[in-house]
Amino acid sequence: QVQLVESGGGSVQAGDSLRISCATSGRTFSPYAMGWFRQAPGKEREFVSAVAAAGNVRYYSDSVKGRFTISRENAKNMAYLQMDSLKPEDTAVYYCVADRSVDGLRYFRSREWEYWGKGTPVTVSS
């Protein structure tokens, strides 16, 4: 089992930056791809970003590309999502995900990810 705990969410103004973190425990971190999904009120959960286990491949949704940066720190069993130029439409609960076998286009599908955190809320006001 892999446990994921998100932190760092909060309320910010449009244009601000925020970094959310994901702490992992339970299994060796390095073989797992890591990612972030989000769910806004009344909307379906959507893919935000993912990074391969080796850290050499990163994916972003079109809505956050150029503003968000995903990273991982294997020595600390941590993953991060740096969010810059935040917009009100970024308001959502952000979920950290992990999986050992996800790859390619499967990164974008929520059902492909085995482990999920409980989420951290991000609110962006205009």
Image: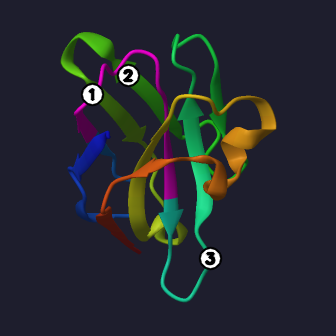
**Residue nearest the observer in this picture, 101 or 20:** 101
In the image, the segment drawn in magenta is 22-37
Q: Residues within 10 Å of mark 3 (few under 14, many from 20)?
A: few
Q: Which residue appears at 34% of the width and 34% of the height?
A: 80
Marks 3/1: CA distance?
Answer: 26 Å
Asked which secondary structure carries label 1, the reply is: strand
Residue 58: x and y, percent? 62, 25
Q: Earlier in the sequence, mark 2 or mark 1?
A: 2
Specify the quadrant of the image occupied by residue 79. top left
Report if the CB atoms under discs 2 and 1 are less than 8 Å apart. Answer: yes
Q: Which residue corresponds to the image point at 50% horizontal and 62% vertical from the top-left?
A: 38
- Of residue 49 and residue 77, the one placed in the foreground of this image is 77
Q: Position of residue 72 (x, y in %)?
A: 38, 22
Residue projecting furthest to the bottom? 42
Count of picture labels = 3
Looking at the rendered structure, which numbered label has been put on residue 72?
2
The residue to which callout 3 is attached is 44
Does residue 32 belong to the magenta stretch? yes
Q: Amino acid at mark 2?
A: Arg
Q: Would residue 97 be visible to someone looking at this image? A: yes
Q: Position of residue 118 (x, y in %)?
A: 30, 62
* Residue located at (51% from left, 47% from top): 114
User: What residue did someone put label 1 on?
Assistant: 78
Please, what is the three-letter code of the amino acid marked with disc 3?
Glu
Residues under labels 2 and 1: Cα distance?
Answer: 6 Å
Which residue is at a point 62% across and 62% down the rendered structure image? 46
Q: Is residue 61 visible?
A: no
Check whether the beta carbons of the residues at disc 2 and disc 3 lie within 8 A of each other.
no
Q: Is residue 126 magenta?
A: no
Q: Residue furthest right?
A: 105
- Judged from the image, the secondary structure of the residue bearing numbered disc 3 is loop
In this rendering, position of residue 101 left or right of residue 35: right
